[in-house]
Image: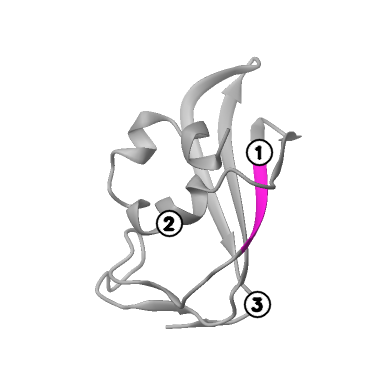
Amino acid sequence: MSQWTELPDSAKNAGVLSELQDALSEAAGGSGPTLDGDWKVWTKAYLATSLLKLDGFGGIPGGGTPIEFRDPNLQIDIGLHQTGGVDDGGWRVVLTSPVVAV
């Protein structure tokens, strides 16, 4: 099972993560789920095959600013929020990169 399939439909269909779909769809590797408070988290180390660039990534002030991850060694954590051990529709994606250019 890939990280992409673990995301709720609301996260996959929002369009905000479409540029990360290839990375999240890779089935190999990854760990999880682990618990982080009320979050069930899947983690995967990912080696980008090309420069990953996000144009106008949602939620960043000045929305048209491109973000480039210049080091191919990325870590992607997907978290599904839980209330009483049941997914409640909340989700998060944390992308960690050694070098980022804005």
x and y percent of residue 56 in the render?
28, 69
Q: Find residue 98 and name its label.
A: 3
Disc on the earlier residue, 2 or 1: 2
x and y percent of residue 2 in the render?
55, 39
x and y percent of residue 49 in the render?
52, 71
Q: Amino acid at mark 2?
A: Leu
Number of disc labels:
3
User: Looking at the image, can residue 95 be seen?
Assistant: yes
How crowded pointer 1 is (Cα within 10 Å; few <14, some 14-19, many 20+) is rated as many
Q: Find residue 32 and name its label.
A: none
Which is in the foreground here, disc 2 or disc 3?
2
x and y percent of residue 83 in the render?
59, 19
- Label 2 residue SS: helix
Q: Amino acid at mark 1?
A: Val
| Labelled pair 2, 1 in contact (Cβ < 8 Å) | no
For the point 69% across and 47% down, the residue is: 29
| Labelled pair 2, 3 in contact (Cβ < 8 Å) | no
Q: How far is mark 2 from mark 3, CA to CA? A: 17 Å
| Labelled pair 1, 3 in contact (Cβ < 8 Å) | no
**Which quarter of the rendered picture does the C terminus lie within?**
bottom left
Q: Find residue 20 and name its label.
A: 2
Disc on the earlier residue, 1 or 3: 1
- Label 1 residue SS: strand
Horizontal arrangement in the rendering, residue 19 relative to residue 91 (left or right): left
Dominant secondary-structure state across the stretch colored magenta: strand
Q: Which residues are magenta?
A: 42-46
